[in-house]
Image: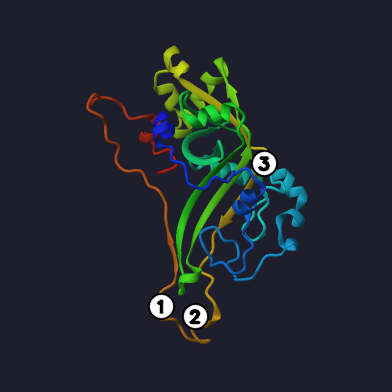
Amino acid sequence: MNDMVDSTSETARDDTSDPASSDARDDAFDDASGDAPDGAFDDDSDGASATDSDSTVGAAPARLREAGATERTAVRNVKRARFERDEAYAILDDDFVAHVGFSVGGDPFVIPMVYGRDGDRLLLHGSVATRIMRALDDGAPACVTVTKVDGLVLARSQFHHSVNYRCVVALGTATRLRDDEARAAFDVICDHLLDGRARESREANRPEERQTMVLAFPLDELSVKVRAAPPSDDPIDLPPEGELSEVWAGVLPLRVVAGVPVADEYTSPDAVLPGALSRGDHRWA
C-alpha cells in the first residue's frame, strides 16, 4: 500500500502558488460562476449565478457547523451542498483512495493515498522517506479530497455535459501516530480496504513499523457536494412542447464492480478466499 505515496511519483507543477492561500481556497470551493458550463463540479446546472444569499454559509449555519463546514469550505450553491456529517462519512466509507494536496517550498503537490476512517478522522500511512509524509508530519496544512463518480451526464450541448458525483473535501493538519496507536491504525486501514482482512493477514513487524509513518487527519472542517440529476439543457436545445428530441441525452450510470479474484503464484489451490470475498460482502459486489 505504500506504493501509493512513493516519492518518485510526486511531480511538481510549474505553478508556484501556495494552495493554502485564500485565492486557492476560493478557487477550490468557488461554484458560483454563472458563465461556466455545467462541468463535473460546477454547481450552477440551471445556468443561474449563485449569489452570496444562496451560499451554504448564510442558508444553514447550524447545519453547516454540524457537518463540519466553515467559511473556507462552504459550498456556494445549496443545490449541491449536503449538511449531514453521516452523508460525508458514507462517501468516505464507500471509497479507499484520497487525493491529498499540500505545499512544500511554494510548490503544490497532490498525491493519491489509501486511507481508513476511524470516527472523526482519516488514517493515512506511507514511507517515512516520502515528501508528503515528512511535510504533513512537519505540520503542513493539507486538503484531502475523496470523490465518487456515479455517472456521465450527456446533454444536448457541449456546454452542459457534466458528471454525477459525490465528493468530500476536508482541510486540516495531520498528527503523527506512534506505537500502539500506529499499530491499531494499520488494522483500520487494512479493514477499510476489505472487511476482516486485518485478521487474515500478518501484522506489521518492527522493521516495517520503523519504515512506515501513520498520520491521523481530522474531519473537523469539511464540505460535502453531490450531483445526482439529469442534464440541464437550455430551452434552445429542447424540442417544442409535445415533441421529442432526436438527440439522445441522459445519464450513463457508472459503478465499480469486482472481477473474479486472481490468486498469485504462491497461493495453494486449497487456500480459502478472504471472508469478505467469499461472502460477497464488500463495496464492489
Residue marked by disc 3: 221
Q: Earlier in the sequence, mark 3 or mark 1?
A: 3
In percent of width and height, residue 285 lies at 40, 44
Residue type at mark 1: give it.
Answer: Val
Residue that badge 1 annotates: 247
Cβ atoms at labels 1 and 2 below 8 Å apart: yes
Disc 3 or disc 1, which is closer to the eye? 3
Q: Earlier in the sequence, mark 3 or mark 2?
A: 3
Helix, strand or loop status at disc 1? loop
Q: Could you tell me residue 186's position as x and y percent? A: 49, 24
Which kind of residue does numbered mark 2 sit on? Asp
Name the residue rendered at 61%, 42% in the picture: 170
Which residue is disc 2 drawn over?
Answer: 237
Q: Disc 3 and disc 2: Cα gap in Å?
A: 40 Å
Indicate the position of residue 210 as horizontal and vertical percent values: 47, 16
Where is residue 242 shown, x and y percent of the image?
51, 87
Few, some or many residues within 10 Å of mark 1 (<14, 14–19, 20+) = few
Q: What element carries label 2?
A: helix
Residue 237 visible here: yes
Q: Can residue 1 be seen in this view?
A: no
- Quarter of image, res 180: top right
Residue flagged by tag 3: what amino acid is it? Glu
Q: Nearer the viewer, residue 112 or 201?
A: 112
Callout 3: SS? strand
**Position above or below: 76 against 247:** above
- Which residue is at 64% across, 51% downward? 23
